[in-house]
Amino acid sequence: KCRVALLTSGGDSPGMNAAIRAVTLACEQHHYECIGFYHGYNGLMDDQAVNLTSELVNPYLQQGGTLLKSARCKSMLLPEGPKQAANTLNKHNIDALIVIGGDGSFRGMQALSHHWSGQLIGLPGTIDNDLAHSDKTIGFATAVQTATEAIDKIRDTANAFERVFIVEVMGRHSGHIAFNVGLATGAESILSFENFDPEKAQAYVEKLAVQIQQQQNNKHSSFLIILAENLWPDGPSGLQQALKQTANIDSGVCILGHIQRGGSPVVEDRLLASKLGLAAVQAIAEKQHLVMLGEVGGNLIATPIENTIQDPKPVSMYWLNAHEEALKGF
Ligand code: F6P
């Protein structure tokens, strides 16, 4: 009987539970055993196993986080980590391991493949949407929804006082969240890696100051700046100070932070996670190995793991241009 193992690794994302559930249910249909490991690769190295059954996983479909817990595990990229992980997999007679996570987790899969001969299947799980070869990653749609709802609330109070707000959103080093949230909230400015050069920070402040003053003179309304995390030197308070020093503009700062990682997954994430979970077990039946499954243009696609790590996933030019166009209205 085929024995499938499953873990979630790296930053958790809403929909990971739906993927765990889909894998478990598909395994039952195929008459495969399904074994989860807690705490990502750490739990694989320390043998923290649990038998996954439909009774156990079903109630988690609509919950954020991951019932298997998660962790970042640096030792998977050192020689001992993958060997230890391989020992546990061999001890449990595992035939295939499904890893739900981001690029760091996929690097762990690559390392493991040098020490273990079973099948390895990756599913893209991260709010950042920074993995190529899947239009969206599991959790991205929910993170954008959550951030949008939070920023709508900031907009209400900002309008009431005609205030400027700088709102920092997550995304690690990519602007998928920033640009999508910026468009969805009608932000007056979006600053992210794709349209910002840190060496020209002062020039951006001056341009921003002019935009803010013009807009506030004409419309007496609020001005929202969506700022990608890890972008501005000294973070959002650095930009806040620069606006004050350059043009005596007062602004509020709001760091949305981990709020964006939690919450019940939206329908889009539940569907994506469920489809990819089912496809992962199908891929095992078809003897696929070292691939990530993603959805591209409505089709389920298997891509070699190394391509998903190497290939960039730029924010679509369409969205960048749409943002510029939208601002011309001001
Ligand atoms: O990759 C998901 C993510 O939430 C990023 O957006 C963010 O930069 C990072 O994880 C935060 O990691 P941690 O929760 O370990 O602080």
Image: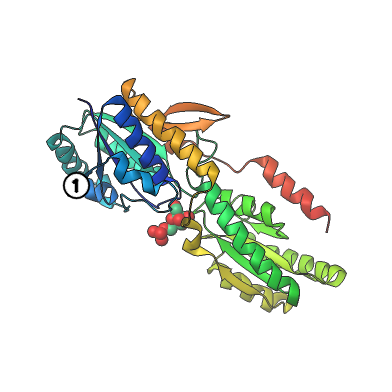
Percent x, y of residue 189: 70, 59
- Furthest-front residue in view? 55
Name the residue rendered at 69%, 65% in the picture: 224
Percent x, y of residue 238: 58, 72
Q: In which quarter of the image is residue 198?
A: bottom right
Name the residue rendered at 68%, 57% in the picture: 185
Rendered position, 176 above or below 251:
above
Q: Is residue 135 left or right of residue 77?
A: right
Query: Visible in this render: residue 248?
Result: yes
Looking at the picture, tell me which residue is in the foreground, 42 or 305. Answer: 42
- Report crowding for label 1: few under 14, some 14 to 19, many 20 or more residues within 10 A (C-alpha): many
Counting labels gives 1
Q: In the image, ligand 1 is in what quadrant?
A: bottom left
Looking at the picture, tell me which residue is in the foreground, 215 or 247. Answer: 215
Name the residue rendered at 78%, 51% in the picture: 326
Is ligand 1 less than 8 Å from the beta carbon at label 1? no
The N terminus, quarter of image: top left
- Furthest-right residue in view? 218
- Residue named by callout 1: 45
SS at mark 1?
helix
Q: Which colour scheme is used?
A: rainbow
What amino acid is labelled 1 in the image?
Met
Q: In this view, does 123 lie to the left or right of 32?
A: right
Percent x, y of residue 54: 32, 39
- Furthest-left residue in view? 91
Rendered position, 298 above or below 49:
above
Rendered position, 242 above or below 100:
below
Percent x, y of residue 34: 26, 36
The C terminus, quarter of image: bottom right
Name the residue rendered at 40%, 54% in the picture: 65
Query: Visible in this render: residue 102?
Result: no
